[in-house]
Image (tube, rainbow, N blue to C red):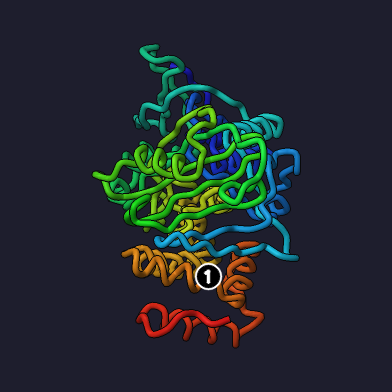
Amino acid sequence: MNEAIYDAVIIGGGPSGSTAATDLALAGHSVLLIERGGRIKPCGGAIPPRLLADFDIPQSLLVAKARSARMIAPSGRAVDMPVGEIGYVGMVDREEFDEALRERARHSGAERMTATFEKIERDDQAHPIVTFRRTRGGPIESVRARVVIGADGARSAVAKQCLPGAERVPCVFAYHEIIKAPPRNTDQFDAARCDVFYQGRLSPDFYAWVFPHGDTASIGVGSANKGFSLRGAIATMRDDLGLDRCETLRREGAPIPLKPLKRWDNGADVIVAGDAAGVVAPASGEGIYYAMVGGRYVADAAAAFLKTGEAKHLRSARKAFMKEHGKVFWVLGMMQYFWYSSDKRRERFVTMCDDKDVQELTWQAYMHKKLVRAKPMAHVKIFFKDTAHLLGLRAATR
């Protein structure tokens, strides 16, 4: 057995795992980042400018900048929501973005390895053993870790092994197709606009999207309905939008969690991050920013644990994340519960998005990743408008 001992072994090299690896390596810890390779998560790729600032992401990783979003109701009614003066929505391609984050971790001092995680084992020594295979059917190898970070996505093998109840976290399944973008803008496709479809025929319980990626575009859909054909929905959408003739470059699918785990650590030496911890925003499905924030909190908690040897520090990661973002997650969860339940409610939801107050606070909350408190009367107005729409009493007013 390889008796190498790392301060931290991180399973999964997505945004969360790579961020944790970079932070821990820069803090002087020995880090092994294990990424299985050959997998790209289905993702619209939208990130707020705050992410670029908080994590020092270069503009060169952006493949496009969206200046507006279009919300499409079951009736076909479209409501445009311009970002306005507060900025733009950055678009990234996960294949390039994730690899850049992994390389940054390596340049920061972390060791990279392409391998498939097997399991965590224990013996009479102090630190757990992480086992893996570098090739399919190859020999099982192992290293020891003072702390193990599971950043291996939804349905995390680390979480399933180490955290009771982790396998019961509700998920939607996301599927998208990356296509060559049309050569010119049309009303149906705009290289500077994100389109979101709230239509039961495309998703009975979530939404579908068309997001620009520069020379390419992501056409995707999510649903927790196991009997619903995601591929069929994409085919319908591409046909409707005249995108069926665009070349398909790749297809990807994966589960996306809908709720943060109640506990991220095992009380000893294992902690999870990113999708493995369930930190994907309800209603929107946004995960990149929250994964990186979660990875940073997990790195901080792991560093405190490594310094003191006290496992209680691992609990601080979830506590800090929920203090900062828990209220937003609750609000978005309520939105998804109410507005995605029927086409009648989806129609009202899109109508409500035509309200200027709603648009302004939506973009402010997205850009700053917190509920906006600067305009309390605007929140009051939106509350009453939202209630009226929910009860079907009237249409939104500007």
Locate residue 287, reporting x and y percent. Answer: 51, 50
Residue found at the very far top of the displayed protein: 138
In front: 148, or 81? Answer: 81
Number of other residues with Cα within 10 Å of mark 1, as a class: few under 14, some 14 to 19, many 20 or more: some
Q: Quadrant of the C terminus?
A: bottom right
Whether residue 279 appears in this view of the structure is yes
Query: Label 1 belongs to which residue?
Result: 353
Locate residue 113, reporting x and y percent. Answer: 55, 23
Q: Is residue 113 left or right of residue 28?
A: left
Residue 92's quadrant in the figure?
A: top right
Locate residue 317, reporting x and y percent. Answer: 51, 55
- Residue 278 position (above or below residue 252): below
Q: Is residue 276 left or right of residue 362?
A: left
Looking at the image, which residue is at 52% across and 34% down? Answer: 178
In front: 381, or 306? Answer: 381
In front: 299, or 185? Answer: 185
Q: Quadrant of the N terminus?
A: top left
In front: 51, or 6? Answer: 51
Looking at the image, which residue is at 62% across and 40% down? Answer: 213
- Residue 348 position (above or below residue 220): below
Whether residue 269 appears in this view of the structure is no
All told, the count of numbered labels is 1
Locate residue 192, reporting x and y percent. Answer: 67, 50
Looking at the image, which residue is at 41% across and 29% down? Answer: 129
- Indicate the secondary structure of the residue bearing disc 1: loop
Amino acid type, callout 1: Cys
Looking at the image, which residue is at 54% across and 86% down? Answer: 381
